[in-house]
Image: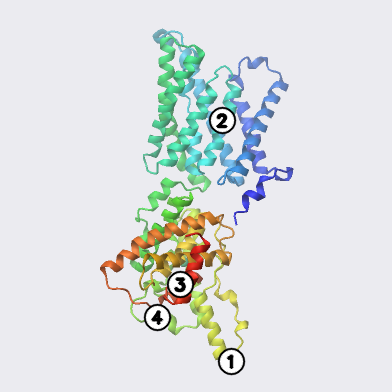
């Protein structure tokens, strides 16, 4: 199932992507443009030497990009991503250039000389905001983009600051710490805390640099250490200001933005809770399921949870046609033909997309609306249509299956795959008459196997190992919710509600017959539970 690594591990020249070439070309040209004059005795360099330096950066960047594309699971830059990576690198180099100009001006300013004496320019080298780009890329594109940025910037600084031997390790350490710090913190204060971490690690690095260079005269050392402390705060300040700009113009969505949306204050979620309380509840439970499972498999838990909240917003339009919002015996589908019922059920995807566009939901959230059903068939109404055709003496083969299928696409990400699985499993788990741990576990396994073998997860990058971890996580969350319920309330009557849900997986329940128990045992064995 996990075929992507195999496809990409063998190098051949046809793989030389345009993204890598663009990234390498832009980076090498911009580095030469901004940092040319910082090179020792730059004026003595011939054009050939400068060309050689550009070529060295070009090849290094290209090699790092290719290596990361092949080896890092979440580094798959499309043209737009490579463009923004180049832009962030360019912005960081511009910041270094501007910072360098300011520090040179400061140390040579007569007032500074009078006050502090003669200071070396490199005393303030560690105050430059090297880690800004790492913070930005981590926030917008993820950890592996930050890692690629770190490697590229380290090489560039090593090449253009040859006299400061610790500058390159300094850049590597501070940028890596910046990436890791931001990935751990998912709140408004994330940048501040990440900046503080950068400062904390920059301080000993600056001290080490002073020891290596033997620059231990007191004023230079003090300025160097103060500059290191300042650099982290500076990076955090700039990154926090620039992130919303990249979000807006790049169409990206950061975890911080998602967390804002997860507060349930969004007008769409409020409307969903009023118009379709059953769907709202279903979405909240799925949110818990996918968040836990995403953490277990290393997917994005915040994106998963928020997508779950919004995945069925299209049901706001006709809530009573969906089983989770129906109370009593009134079933509107009884008065409709199967094809009309299927049309209404299918339309919640289209209406969800329209609402997403109207409310300007971020693209990754809107994409989940059609993908959570993939190209599944609405089994209940398809079967009903076949049955009616047979009863009328018609050929059930002539029924247009496309009328009963969701338009797709299939889940394209691990988070979307998770959502599809949770959607079907939650709906089926509600109908379990006695939701014991074993019954829930059996149901989860059965439905995961069913979705997997239907081929709907083929484009989602989920591996068999992921499915195993997802099954364990879903079982734990659902047992916590539904098993507790029977301890305090009257056992729920088994209903036929499951038959009206949309995904084929929704049709399953735990009838408790021997055949099903045997099947469940088989499923458990298959996934090693
Ligand atoms: Fe749905
Ligand atoms: Fe749903």
Q: List the residue tagged with mark 3.
A: 517
Mark 3 vs 1, N-terminal side: 1
Q: Position of residue 38 (x, y in %)?
A: 58, 19
Q: CA distance from mark 2 to mark 4?
A: 63 Å
Up-down relation of residue 488 to residue 196 (above or below): below
Q: Nearer the viewer, mark 4 or mark 3?
A: 3
Which residue is depicted at the point 40% across and 41% down? 185
The residue lying at 40 percent from left, 80 percent from top is 331
Give the Cα distance between marks 3 and 1. Answer: 36 Å
1 vs 4, front mark: 1
Give the labeled residue for mark 1: 393
Do the residues bearing badges 3 and 1 touch, measured as CB atoms within 8 Å? no
Residue 86 is left or right of residue 245, and the answer is right
Q: Residues within 10 Å of mark 1 (few under 14, many from 20)?
A: few
Question: Residue at the location (54% across, 40% down)?
Answer: 145
- Upstream in the sequence, badge 2 or badge 4? 2
Rendering coords of residue 449 (x, y %): 52, 65
């Amino acid at each position: 199932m996990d075929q992507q690594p195999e496809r990409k591990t063998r190098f051949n020249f046809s793989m030389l992507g345009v993204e890598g070439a663009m990234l390498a070309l832009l980076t090498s040209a911009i580095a030469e443009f901004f940092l040319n004059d910082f090179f020792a005795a730059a004026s003595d360099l011939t054009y050939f030497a400068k060309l050689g330096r550009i070529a060295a950066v070009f090849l290094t960047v290209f090699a790092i990009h290719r290596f990361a594309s092949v080896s890092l699971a979440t580094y798959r830059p499309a043209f737009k991503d490579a463009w923004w990576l180049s832009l962030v690198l360019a912005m960081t180099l511009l910041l270094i250039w501007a910072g360098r100009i300011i520090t040179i001006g400061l140390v040579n300013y007569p007032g500074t000389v009078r006050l502090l004496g003669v200071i070396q320019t490199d005393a303030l080298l560690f105050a430059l905001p090297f880690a800004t780009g790492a913070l930005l890329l981590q926030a917008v594109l993820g950890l592996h983009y930050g890692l690629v940025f770190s490697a590229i910037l380290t090489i560039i600084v090593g090449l253009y600051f040859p006299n400061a031997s610790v500058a390159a390790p300094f850049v590597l350490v501070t940028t890596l710490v910046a990436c890791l710090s931001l990935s751990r913190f998912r709140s408004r204060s994330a940048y501040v805390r990440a900046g503080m971490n950068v400062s904390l690690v920059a301080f000993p690095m600056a001290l080490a640099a002073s020891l290596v260079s033997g620059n231990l005269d007191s004023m230079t050392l003090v300025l160097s250490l103060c500059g290191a402390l300042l650099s982290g705060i500076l990076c955090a300040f700039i990154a926090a200001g620039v992130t919303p700009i990249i979000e807006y113009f790049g169409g990206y969505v950061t975890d911080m933005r998602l967390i804002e949306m997860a507060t349930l204050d969004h007008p769409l979620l409020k409307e969903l809770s009023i118009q379709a309380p059953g769907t709202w509840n279903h979405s909240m439970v799925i949110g818990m399921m996918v968040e836990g499972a995403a953490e277990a498999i290393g997917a994005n838990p915040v994106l998963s949870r928020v997508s779950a909240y919004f995945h069925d917003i299209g049901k706001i339009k006709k809530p009573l046609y969906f089983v989770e919002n129906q109370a009593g015996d009134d079933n509107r589908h009884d008065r409709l033909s199967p094809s009309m019922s299927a049309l209404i059920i299918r339309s919640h995807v289209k209406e969800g997309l329209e609402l997403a566009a109207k409310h300007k939901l971020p693209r990754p959230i809107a994409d989940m609306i059609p993908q959570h059903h993939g190209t599944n068939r609405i089994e209940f109404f398809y079967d009903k249509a076949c049955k009616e055709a047979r009863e009328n003496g018609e050929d059930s083969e002539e029924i247009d299956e496309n009328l009963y299928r969701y338009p797709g696409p299939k889940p394209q990400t691990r988070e979307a795959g998770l959502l599809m699985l949770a959607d079907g499993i939650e709906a089926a788990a509600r109908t379990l008459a006695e939701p014991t741990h074993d019954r829930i576990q059996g149901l989860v396994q059965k439905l995961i196997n069913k979705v997997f073998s239907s081929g709907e997860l083929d484009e989602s990058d989920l591996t068999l190992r992921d499915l195993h971890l997802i099954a364990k996580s879903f079982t734990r969350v659902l047992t916590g919710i539904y098993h507790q319920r029977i301890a305090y309330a009257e056992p729920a009557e088994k209903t036929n509600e499951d038959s009206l849900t949309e995904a084929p997986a929704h049709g399953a329940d735990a009838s408790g017959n021997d055949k099903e128990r045997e099947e469940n045992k088989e499923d458990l064995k298959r996934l090693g539970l």
